[in-house]
Amino acid sequence: MKNMYKIVFIILLTFIYYSNCFAQFTPPGLGDTNDASWFALGIKQKLNSSGNVVSSTHIGLGRISNPDNYNLFQNPSIYVFNEEISNHFKKHWKYSVALSYRWQNQYNTSAPYELDSENARQEIRAYGRLFYLNSLKNIDYSFSFRPEIRFFYNRNFDSYIEDRQFRTRFRGKMTLNLNNFKTHKLITTAEFLLSATREDNNWNKFGYKEARFSLYYAYTLATLNTTFNFGYMNNLLGKSDLQVVHYLAFDIEIKNPF
């Protein structure tokens, strides 16, 4: 438990030091549930005079419904600390590297679905992203590839049942600028996830696991240099036997406060 406090403390220091965020924080997948909600707060800060190197941090909270209802605010599910540094090194190309810590609650599968605190899961995640960026009139669009490695632990930092996972993501994103000042936007994304997980030192087969589709409205308050993002995400789990999860999301992005 002491190790957990040390890691959380280090991540909090990183958050305070860099003071940044990543725009429009789509929700993390929260597994097999009916509905979920997501709130995130972050700050994005330029790290050099040209503005092509940016440090981004956000903190977030996700909540889920019980299996027998659709109350998307019912149970606290996940707490996220995420740090990402990006470099827009060419006109159409950008890459980033990131480190993330996550605590995810578990709940009993039978009524009254009480918190199962002994089986809470911790995660440390490292990933990189490569972006292709372009625009067409008032539309901005991008494609990205994101490989990541995930390490899972129980509440005492012992290895979890499924102790690690390698995952890749392919995402397309399109932004429609609704006015000339680009303060009102519609943002849509489609993301496909493939992964392989290790359990008892055995890796399962690498393959498609889920897809995520989202639609956001973004409003930028220029006087405060702050953007408010309101959105919906549809998470499709599995292939032939689909599980559909609906997410309502809201996040706040503060740009260059320092």
Image (cartoon, grey):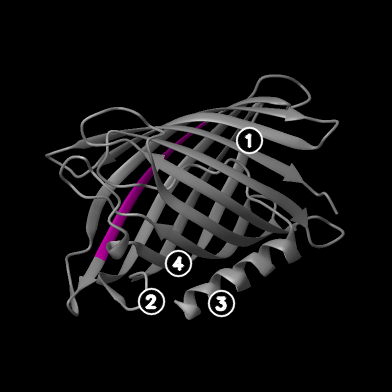
**Tag 1 residue:** 135
For mark 4, what is the residue? Answer: 125
Query: Residue 231: x, y in percent?
Result: 51, 29
Which of the two discs, 2 and 3, labels the residue nearer the N terminus? Answer: 3
| N-term-proximal mark, 1 vs 2 | 1
Residue 165 part of the magenta segment: no
User: SS at mark 2?
Assistant: loop
Q: What is the distance, in whole Å, between disc 1 and disc 3 at their CAs?
A: 43 Å
Picture quadrant where residue 147 is located: bottom left
Residue 1: horizontal and vertical position, in percent? Answer: 44, 76
The first of marks 2 and 4 along the sequence is 4
What amino acid is at disc 4?
Answer: Arg
Q: Nearer the viewer, residue 76 or 241?
A: 76
Q: Secondary structure at mark 3?
A: helix
Circle on res. 6: 3
Q: CA distance from mark 3 to mark 4?
A: 16 Å
Q: Which mark is residue 92?
A: none
Whether residues under marks 2 and 4 lie with C-beta atoms below 8 angstroms apart, the answer is no
The CA span between labels 2 and 3 is: 12 Å
Q: Given contact means CB atoms under 8 Å apart, are the residues at marks 1 and 4 in contact?
A: no
Q: Using the image, tell me which numbered label, if any, was put on residue 157.
A: 2
Along the polypeptide, which appears first: circle 1 or circle 4? Answer: 4
Distance between the alpha carbons at the discs numbered 1 and 4: 31 Å
Circle 3 residues within 10 Å: few <14, some 14–19, many ≥20: few
**Mark 1 or 2: the one toward you:** 2
Type of amino acid under label 2: Phe
**Quadrant holding the C terminus:** bottom right
Name the amino acid type tagged 3. Lys
Name the dominant secondary structure of the magenta segment. strand
Q: What x and y, as percent, mark residue 127?
A: 48, 65
- Depicted 207 relative to depicted 110: above or below: below
Magenta range: 188-196
